[in-house]
Amino acid sequence: MSVERRVVTIDGPSGAGKSTLARMLARRLGFRYLDTGAMYRAVALLAQMEGPDISDGGLQRILDEFSIRFVTGEGGGERTIVVDRDVTDDIRRPDITARSSELSGDLRVRKRMTELQREFGKRESLVAEGRDMGTVVFPDARAKFFLVADEKERARRRCLELRGAGERLSESEVLDQLQQRDQRDRSREAAPLRPAPDAVIVDSTHRTQESVLAEVLRILKNKIPELEF
């Protein structure tokens, strides 16, 4: 099976539930789940360690030396390994989230991440989740989805995630952060957040994860009949 037939893309804004859907779908299909957001976050973490005013040369060195692996941890969850260091928890910090959003607009960062993501696609079947999987990284993928949800619902979900991680933010604060990030992602020059022309829009507002997965599986069966799951 060619690369474009082995990749399913799931794009969309934060809080729409795409990471959960992508993980569930990957398990169902027996594909690798590719968390592209973790890749950008890992770059942001390394940049943060260099300091707030990292030079262009410093960032380029990070990109030149960057390597990342996704492995299964002891409890069965996925761990993110960067240069032999487990950064799974570190890259979820709020400051790294903010830095990642800023760096994602850098053309050098996007170019390097796109190269690495395509390498993953050459090695194994993927459910690739991100913001530009269907438009830039895997434009020939036969199955593309763009997951959306009402802003307030997205803020509510994100707020629950943050509270689970020990962060105490109000839904209004989280909503403001989401809106700012959406604006940055949609207006950036490099790979702006938008659905691919051939992507299927799926609204997850007030729906269970299982019902969204069932809808995606029905669509996949029609798009790629030879897929077994």
Image: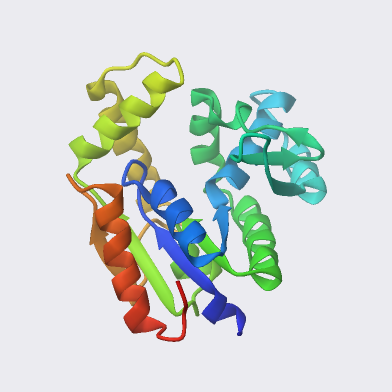
- Residue 190 seen anywhere in this rendered image of the structure: no
Residue 228 x/y as whole percent? 47, 77
**For the point 28% across and 22% down, which residue is it?**
173
**For the point 29% across and 52% down, which residue is it?**
210
Height in image: 105 above or below 199?
above
Judged left or right of residue 58, residue 31 is left
* Frontmost residue, 225 versus 115: 225
* Frontmost residue, 16 versus 74: 74
* Frontmost residue, 161 versus 140: 161
Judged left or right of residue 46, residue 205 is left
Residue 163 x/y as whole percent? 37, 19
What is the quadrant of the N terminus in the image?
bottom right
Judged left or right of residue 224, residue 112 is right
Residue 145 sits in which quadrant? bottom left
Height in image: 169 above or below 87?
above
- Residue 152 seen anywhere in this rendered image of the structure: yes
Residue 82 x/y as whole percent? 74, 40
**For the point 72% across and 48% down, which residue is it?**
69
Residue 5 x/y as whole percent? 53, 81
Judged left or right of residue 59, residue 111 is left
**For the point 55% across and 50% down, which residue is it?**
35
Indicate how the structure is coloured in the image.
rainbow
Height in image: 68 above or below 98?
below
> Disc count in the image?
0
What is the quadrant of the C terminus in the image?
bottom left
Residue 76 sits in which quadrant? top right
